[in-house]
Image (tube, grey):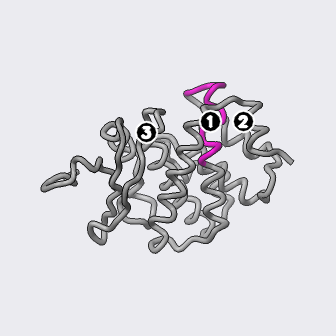
Amino acid sequence: METIDLLFARHRPDVAHAEHVALLASQLFEGTHSLHQLDERALSMLHTAALLHDIAALQDRDTHHILGRDLIMASDLHGFNKIERQMMACMVAFHRNKRFKPRTEPLFARLDASRQQTTIILTGLLRVADGLDRSHSQSTHIHQIAPKSDDMWVITTVGAYSNSDCEQANEKTLTDYTPLPLLWAIPLQKLGPGSMKR
């Protein structure tokens, strides 16, 4: 059985970034739980996929999402069965901006409809979390997650690079595939009239 630590030692990703994205993804999961109502097992998969989302970045930055997908499927990851590894591999494959094409991914196509929906919801959370540390500074933190309307929930953030990190998170938010409302990130200092215009 392979562990996260063993994969980190072998592939040498940016561990600080991976751990911060995993923290942000877990906070997003908890903050939107009333919307998706997924269980603790889903949270465990999201947290692990977030830790491993850049596992292959050192090998090839341009294709690391595909290489990472393959590494997860090739590993006997401790604590997860084959279907769960398949779902996490899809999350890693889909985490990059403008690379979300689930219908062309064979691993995704082999999942049943319920697991496909879970995978897409978790992918949406992972993509936003990854965007919130686009600076790789681990300085952007979630202050609050709250509904703005039926169609939008706002993630209020703080941190030195929160402006640019929020911009990246908003580019990566999923609106066409996920059943969740739009998750829109804004820096706390920008709260005010007109601050949530798209």
| Up/down of 127 relative to 146, above or below | above
Element class at badge 2 = helix
Residue 16 drawn at (x, y percent): 58, 36
Are the two marked residues, 3 and 1, in contact with CB atoms closer than 8 angstroms?
Answer: no
Alpha carbon separation for disc pair 3 and 1: 15 Å
Label 2 Cα neighbours within 10 Å, binned few <14 / some 14-19 / many ≥20: some
The mark nearer the N terminus, 2 or 3, is 2
Q: Is residue 54 magenta?
A: yes
SS class, disc 1:
helix
Q: Is residue 77 above or below residue 71?
A: below
Q: Quote the CA–CA distance across marks 2 and 1.
A: 7 Å
Residue denoted by label 1 = 15
Residue at 44 percent across and 49 percent down: it is 128
Which segment is the magenta one? 50-61
Residue 79 magenta = no
Q: Which mark is residue 139?
A: 3
Residue 14 x, y percent position in the rendering: 60, 32
How busy is the neighbourhood of tag 3: few (under 14 within 10 Å), some, or many (20 plus)?
some
Image marks 2 and 1: residues in contact by CB distance under 8 Å: yes
Compare residues 99 and 163 and report the one nearer the observer. Answer: 163
Q: Nearer the viewer, mark 2 or mark 3?
A: 3
Please identify, in this view, whether the residue under mark 3 or under mark 1 is nearer the observer. Answer: 3
Looking at the image, which residue is at 41% across and 43% down?
140
Q: Residue 8: which disc?
A: 2
Q: Along the horizontal axis of the image, is 148 left or right of 42?
A: left
Check whether the beta carbons of the residues at disc 2 and disc 3 lie within 8 A of each other: no
- Would you say 36 lies left or right of 10 here? left
User: What residue is drawn where x is 63% and y is 45%?
Assistant: 51
Res 11 → quadrant: top right
Labels 3 and 1: the sequence-earlier one: 1
The residue sitting at the right extreme is 1
